[in-house]
Image: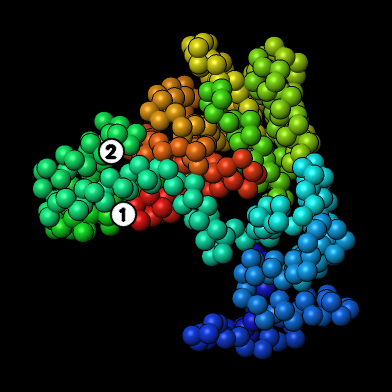
Amino acid sequence: MGFFTKIKKLWKGPGEAAETTPAGPARTEPTPAETAPIQEAATNDWQQDLTLALRQAEPRLSHWLALILKDVDKAGDALWQRLSFLFQALDAPVDEAQKFIQHFKKWLDDLGYQNVSEFRSELQYRLALALDLEDEEDERDRLFLKLSQGMAMTREQIARRIDGLLAAHKTMDERFWEEFEEILIVSDVGMEAAVKLMAKLKARARKAQAADPAEFKDLLRQELEDIFKAPKRIQALNPPEVVMVVGVNGVGKTTTIAKLAHRARMQGRKVLIAAGDTFRAAAIEQLEIWAERVGAGLFAKPEGSDPAAVAFEAVDKAISEGYDLLLLDTAGRLHTKVNLMEELKKIKRVLGKKHPGAPHRSVLVIDATTGQNALSQTKLFNEAVGVDEIILTKLDGTAKGGVMVAVGLQFGLPVSFVGLGEKMEDLRPFSGADFARALVD
């Protein structure tokens, strides 16, 4: 049970449903057993005041954080005491609170942040991960807002043209569909994907007996949601989980790996990063810096070492030292693509021999700004190592986000995360429903 679920019990008794009024949710008085964690935590005046405020607040992380940060402008003892109190009030283990605060202090020191305004968003993101709140309504709203902002350029490219199309037609006739196909092609969806999407939309419209252009956006939204529905996956695996990260140079693999490690660390996992791109000394150095920043372990060998040997020895280290997750970086030199793909195949074979079932996931990182090039990259890596999921970076800086539709239609691969900026918090879980809403509405 997540801590959010626990704390919500403080506002209503077992088996009772909170009644709602126009002014907001009404709360019943909690039982002594339910309020014990907070009451035990409140040992002086400021804690008692904060306890009362937390109990009366809307049970959302953003509301709690606003109370925790009230009258706190800078990082310091007051902030650490209040964060520690929040963890205690949520009945979280003391050592988890201490680790969280220790890591956050180090992050602030590394970046030189002091003012709350500089780090508030990152703090809320970390708390959401650490306290298992990311799936709650408050965080979903934040994610949708971030996604919508990141897709502004793509939405302008597509939605504006669709609005013009709808205004110019009274019925979804053949001319309507031809013009829509043109919109898809110039929006980096591409010819092949445009034809597939058109066929699906026409079939959906026929089934719904829809001919009025006013119904088109709903049809498109539903179709996009279906395209990005993630398939069911067997979650059980033999630890440690091994994730091989592939992609061409320049797409943001290194920082993506760092962000994945950061997420996992905030969720309490012990993470090892392996520097499998041994052809670039800079790649190894970057991973070393990032691993230290996010609190992950690093396995690396000298420049020019055999990447398969790096993978083999990294798994050995991960098993022997009790790591939960191994993130393996790989080279991405497309100008020698034959050798590169053979190298990746070798790495995959070695991983499977050393740790049966590994890699448990092969993740392809692609750059949204490359548009149609993303399709050829997906094809190439999928044929070589079998891609399980895609992470799309730099979505916030492009009008070519329509390529996501093409990738989903042509390869049927799920998009697990999207990059919406440079900060750690800007790698966010991808939601097909939110993407469809952000693109069409």
Q: Which mark is residue 222?
A: 1
- Residue nearest the viewer, comparing 88 with 396: 396
> Where does the image place residue 116, in percent across and percent down from the top left?
74, 57
> Where does the image place residue 285, in percent across and percent down from the top left?
74, 24
Residue type highlighted by circle 1: Gln
Q: Which mark is residue 184?
A: 2
Secondary structure, mark 1, is helix
Q: CA distance from mark 2 to mark 1?
A: 17 Å
The crowd level at tag 1 (other Cα within 10 Å; few <14, some 14-19, many 20+) is: some
* Quadrant placement of the C terminus: bottom left
* Quadrant placement of the N terminus: bottom right
Quarter residue 321 falls in: top right
Image point 55% across, 16% down: which residue?
333
Residue type highlighted by circle 2: Leu
In the image, is 355 to the left or to the right of 39? left
The answer to whether residue 327 is above or below residue 156 is above
- Residue nearest the viewer, comparing 51 with 169: 169
Image point 41% across, 25% down: which residue?
373
Quarter residue 253 falls in: top right
> Where does the image place residue 53, in percent across and percent down from the top left?
72, 79
Q: Is residue 20 visible?
A: yes
